[in-house]
Image: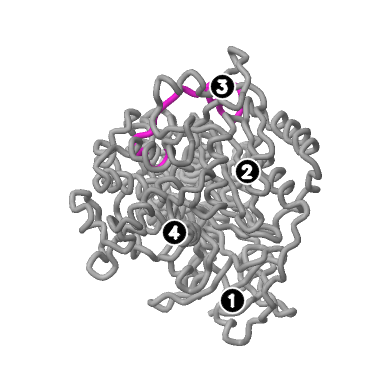
Amino acid sequence: MEVRTSLLRPLLMILLLAGLIEPVGAEPALPKAPRTLAELDARLEEALKKGETPGAAIAVIEDNKVVWTKGYGYRDLKAKAPVTDETIFRAGSITKSFTGLLAMTMVEEGKLSLDARLAEVAPGIGFDNPWEQTEPVRIVHLMEHTTGWHDLRFPDVVRLNPRDEIGRDLGITRRLRVSRWQPGRYMAYSNVGPGVMGAILEQIGGAPYAEQMRGRILGPLGMNSSEFALTDAMSANLSKSYDVDGKTEIPYHGIGISAAGSMLTTASDLAKFVIFMNNRGKTQQGAQIVTPESVARMERPQSTLAAKAGLGYGYGLGVFYAPQTNFIVYGHNGGIDGFESAYVYWPQQRKGYVLLVNGGRANADALELITLYLGRDFQSAANPPEVKPGQEFAPYTGYYYAVAQRHLFMNALVGLYPNEVSLQSNGRVNALGAERIGIGSNMFRREERPEATLIFYTTPEGQREFSTGREVMRQFTQTELASLAAMLAGAGLAIAIALLSIVTRPIRMLVPNWRRSTGPLAATMRWAPTFSVLSLLTMLGVFLIVANAGYQAVELLGRPNAATYAIYGASFAWPAFAALGLILSIANTGSTKPSRAAAFLISLGMLGLAAHFFANGWIGIRFWE
């Protein structure tokens, strides 16, 4: 049985209009690149102002030297204290790059193996892996985010110890250390793995994580204004942070899992790390901390199915590898309590930059402007020759759904949107809303990308998938696709009938001769399905409103309060009302056929959708636990 595209598209439009799923499409055209530092400065100032960013610090590297640094705005709005070269920002997940570097120093010293089993290296660290006998969790999986573990949940972020006591926080994250698929199969970003890596580094190095970083990494690099634990000396220059409105100050909270996000630094200090990575592991003073081979290992993933199939794009040992327009960059970004950060470098061109901001919404625009400036005159090497896929690619066409999400509950939303893969008449493939050019071995690149950013493969179980290195899609079977179409049709019809019923009921009540069922059972039958729809909309509406509350979203969703209780209660009310409506539509034979039919269809549609949400943890969800 085939499920036609013409059937799916109108059903998906209902969800798109409701804002419950997000379409994918071609990227917007890039703005014109700034030609000079003066133009870059002016456009950055405009972007930061437009994005209501209180303060920012920037360092630009060309010919592997810092050619420009600047502070914008204020590190403290109330005191009107400006951002200077000495201003310290929190760098968040950029910490993971340093954790990866520290791990590689121990690999080179023979104290650690990336392929070692976690259970053997640190038997005291508990975790659950149903495939441990054949597919064990290994050290490499902790750093490449391929353990299959959950990421931190909202209450975990609230409860993590600000005093950086790693042992205590390993206890808090124990319930998250559960492999949801075979370790090494997919990349799903999780702060828990690097947090465990920090404990292992402390065990091997015989000293606290921050102390080892000072002695083995920061000191040799000359990063004297950086730390991995807040000290009194650093507090004087530490920037305050602000919410997305650029005005609401966010209190300082430490992070317990130090190795995942505790770094504090300045733009000039972090620029030294960029130069170090461009120098392939050598400091500006000539000291070789790790070999060029170790730096290269940090930059590319090796453990995932996609990487083993040949895709280089993705996440290595604390470093992202990302082909951009005509060139390839490496780096990492970070975000913590209003702070956002990024460092980017491309060693072949000996360029890079650092951007640190303390709030607002201008981070992405500023990153784009700096990248455009540094790539303004770059002429890419010849792209790989096009290899048009043959008939052997035909089985990979069809519809795909997202798997391997950071959070299980997100599967309920992203799983509703099937992504079509089609082979075009020109021999190119359309996937994720963009045309892809084949380069052989089922690998594809965008027109403007110098390397493959997508690969198709078949799993050992015979399932067809494609990966972008960070995102994994699995092909629907015809049965799964038919079930999805039926579920979306039922849900769309249910919502439409329920809303129409709400709108027309007052009119029908005013018409004297309108035939309608009477009595409490009939009234319950009519209203139960409607309340089911309203409960669903309440659950999703409250979640979406709170989730878009900036920094307060974590506080609100991580604690028991009116919002989380409303989501919890509505998640039960929705299927309960639907079940009641379905039972009464069948049992209440005294009601009119149109009323029973409407109640039946609405209730059945709601129960079908509820089954999907139940499978992804939404029914009875307690965000605060």
Identify the amino acid type marked 4. Answer: Ser
Give the residue number, with chain letter if any, for mark 2. Answer: 353
Question: Which mark is on residue 248?
Answer: 3
Left or right: residue 476 compared with residue 80: left
Question: Which mark is on residue 165?
Answer: none
Identify the amino acid type marked 1. Answer: Thr
Label 1: few (<14), some or many (≥20) within 10 Å? some
Give the extent of the magenta segment. 240-261
Q: Is residue 252 above or below residue 501?
A: above
Give the residue number, with chain letter if any, for mark 4. Answer: 294
Give the alpha-carbon distance from disc 2 to disc 4, as whole Å: 22 Å
* Whether residue 301 can be seen here: yes
Question: Which mark is on residue 397?
Answer: 1
The mark that comes first in sequence, 1 or 3, is 3
Labels in figure, total = 4
Single out the residue that lies furthest toward the front. Answer: 286
The mark that comes first in sequence, 2 or 4, is 4
Q: Is residue 459 above or below residue 123?
A: below
Q: Is residue 499 above or below residue 129?
A: above
Give the colour scheme shown.
one colour
Residue that appears at 36% across and 38% down? 215
Which is more foreground, mark 2 or mark 1? 2
Give the alpha-carbon distance from disc 4 to disc 3, as whole Å: 42 Å
Label 3: few (<14), some or many (≥20) within 10 Å? some
Single out the residue that lies furthest toward the left. Answer: 124
The mark that comes first in sequence, 1 or 4, is 4
Label 2: few (<14), some or many (≥20) within 10 Å? many
Give the alpha-carbon distance from disc 3 to disc 2, as whole Å: 28 Å
Residue 249 is inside the magenta segment:
yes
Single out the residue that lies furthest toward the bottom. Answer: 391
Rendering quarter of residue 462: bottom left
